[in-house]
Amino acid sequence: MTARPAGRPGADGAEGAALLQRVILPRPADPTSVRALYLDEGTATSMETTAPTAYRPGTFDDSVEEYVVHVRRSGGRVAEVVSRTGVRLPERSEVSFAAYFNAFPAAYWRRWSVLDAVSLRLRLRGRGRVDVYRSTAKGVPVHLAGQTVATEDDTEVVVPVSLTPFADGGWVWFDLSSDNDALELVSGGWYADREAPGRAAIAVGMPTFNRPSDCVATLTALGEDPLVSETLTAVIIPDQGSSKVRDQPGYAEAAAALGDRLRIIDQPNLGGSGGYARIMHEALETTDCEQILFMDDDVVLEPDSVLRALAFSRFAREDMLVGGQMLSLQARSHLHAMGEVVDRGHFFWQIAPHTEDDHDFAVDSLRETLWMHRRTDVDYNAWWMCLIPRTVAERIGLPLPLFIKWDDCEYGLRAGSHGIPTATVPGVAIWHMSFVEKDDTSDWQAYFHVRNRLVVAALHGPDNPRAMLADSLKRTLRHLFLLEYSTIALHHMAMRDFLSGPKALFGALPTALGAVRATRAEFPDGTVHRGADDLPRPALGAREAQLWPRPPVGRIAQVAALARGLVHQMRPVDPAAHERPQRDVPAEHSQWFLLSMLDGAAVTTSDGSGVTFRKRDREMFWAMLRESVRLHAEVGKAWPALRRRYRDAMGELVSRTAWREQVFDRFR
């Protein structure tokens, strides 16, 4: 650990040292909860680690073979954020940078990069101390180095850190503590010991559909950060909506900052896959970019994430996809998931093993969240943010023409089949609308969920689809019990379209959504009313309306509830329940074991914006169940032939020529 007078600040620190990750602080407009992603304001030096071999009553649960870290919280915030890169500590205070955006995810760099070591470089002013820590894969903190600072001028502190101990997991971070005077961090970052290979030349792409204000905000964020802006070769926006980005307030200023690098392409709504395919096609055909960065339009960008993804890609020992994580736009201190994988038996996505979803850093800091110190490996990364090297796009092609759902997952699986891995890197992230308050498996998107799951499974899934089809039938029965007949109609439509083969996928891009909406509108549960007041009020009294059955726990109770639900489907429907719902059901209580016992219910949508009037139809229930069984059996019987057809068509479906001739040239 060394300290020396600081030279002129620059993006690359010392000569030949490439910046990997800046130390950054919240923006003035950020909500209070966001602060926990940048600073850990628990007392930095009072951590107590309890190992399984050193059990002490009251501090460790000996039934769990894990370490426990206890962090004593301070009385409140003391650090004063003075800029995006600077923070000031008053006298006799301390703060830790063991936080999501400022700790260094060393295990990921150890696993995927060519680097053997990194350096922490801090520009400090005042009196105090710097302490650098690392963690093990179990989350145990280890002190690496310490250095006192006492200067009125800027001083640079440099701490080299070997990446050798991080094979299975671990982070590196630093703490600051002030002495009898204030201590100010002017700027800092994590650096490589060499220049980055290749060129920084990113084509950023965001397909958008009627989210012009969000899109303009992202364009502004890209253009106003000088370090980010200088890496951009092109910014490509396929505008697929009726509310145009060009007409949005603030667009002119954002466009001026980006200049002729910004390209707005008007095209019909071809879904996410049609938008991302257009971005990749334009980037490959019309730019000299080295990296293609996909982002959603409805995000809030942390600009340094662009630089971090770029640095990770350039230092990677092999071509790979670099994925950003998703933070919740509704609850800004929440991390959606550490990484995602595909269950190859049931063939459905899920969070990676040994991780948790919807983690709140404002409640449990990085130091306290022990599972987060293990490295998490993934099968794919969603396209809310994902960087794809040009060489990968040229080698494996464009996205499949799936409209929405499964296109990002399929691309990751396809890359993996070519020996190209994906890394979802902590600290590379955007804020995106959380899926916690959505249930897109039951609305119009249900068609794309089912059809595209089958398409991707045919390309990358099991030889024997029995487990996947059994899971699909289970989901079918659940939707029928929920009185979601429109959802099952879309499932049937999806399975028939899958059975018809791959040739129709391109042609369906501009038409499938209209057909889906028309089918859904034929059913009562497909019509969303403004609120419960638009429907007759249930006859239940106030007390009864607030009583809810408990979920069946255990196999016996679940089988019994299933049997009761099936018996009820055999009974005649009460006609009065189709005129007046038997009860209002909040979204949190719209569960199969309740709705399977009702003949009519006003059910709040998962996002709370409306209400559907669901009406039981005995004949429709059994007819749809029989058709579902028949279609699943047909898919199972035809599976070997279908796999061959889809795999044989793969090259055509992802080729630039096919996308241009069958889609883009039609809408110029």
Image: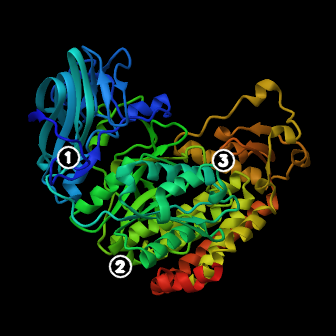
Circle 2 — which element?
A: helix
Which residue is under mark 3?
Answer: 592
The residue carrying mark 1 is: 13
> How many marks can you see?
3
The extreme left residue here reads: 2
The residue mark sitting in front, 3 or 2, is 2
Q: Dividing the image into 4 quarters, which one contains the C terminus?
A: bottom right
Q: On the rendered structure, is 464 left or right of 590?
A: left
Q: Is residue 370 left or right of residue 507?
A: left
Instruction: Please tell me which of labels 1 and 2 falls first in the chain.
Output: 1
**Residue drawn at the location 39% of the way across and 74% of the way down:** 393
Q: Is residue 206 above or below residue 299?
A: below
Q: CA distance from mark 1 to mark 3?
A: 59 Å
State how far apart marks 1 and 2 are (Cα): 35 Å
Q: Nearer the viewer, mark 1 or mark 2?
A: 1
Which quadrant of the structure image shows residue 633?
Answer: bottom right
* Residue 215 placement: quadrant: bottom right
Disc 3 element: helix
Q: The residue under label 1 is which amino acid type?
A: Gly
Please state which of the two labelled residues, at mark 1 or mark 3, is closer to the viewer. Answer: 1
Asked whether the viewer can see residue 298, the reply is no
In x, y percent, where is residue 454? Answer: 53, 71
Residue 153, position in %: x, y? 18, 27
Residue sitting at x 48%, y 54%: 257
Q: Nearer the viewer, residue 111 or 352?
A: 111
Residue at image mark 2: 395
Residue 319: image x %, image y %?
A: 28, 68
Relative to 494, does residue 259 appear above or below in the rendering? above
Residue at position x 26%, y 48% in the image: 11
User: Depth check: 549 or 394 in front?
Assistant: 394
Q: CA distance from mark 3 to mark 2?
A: 46 Å
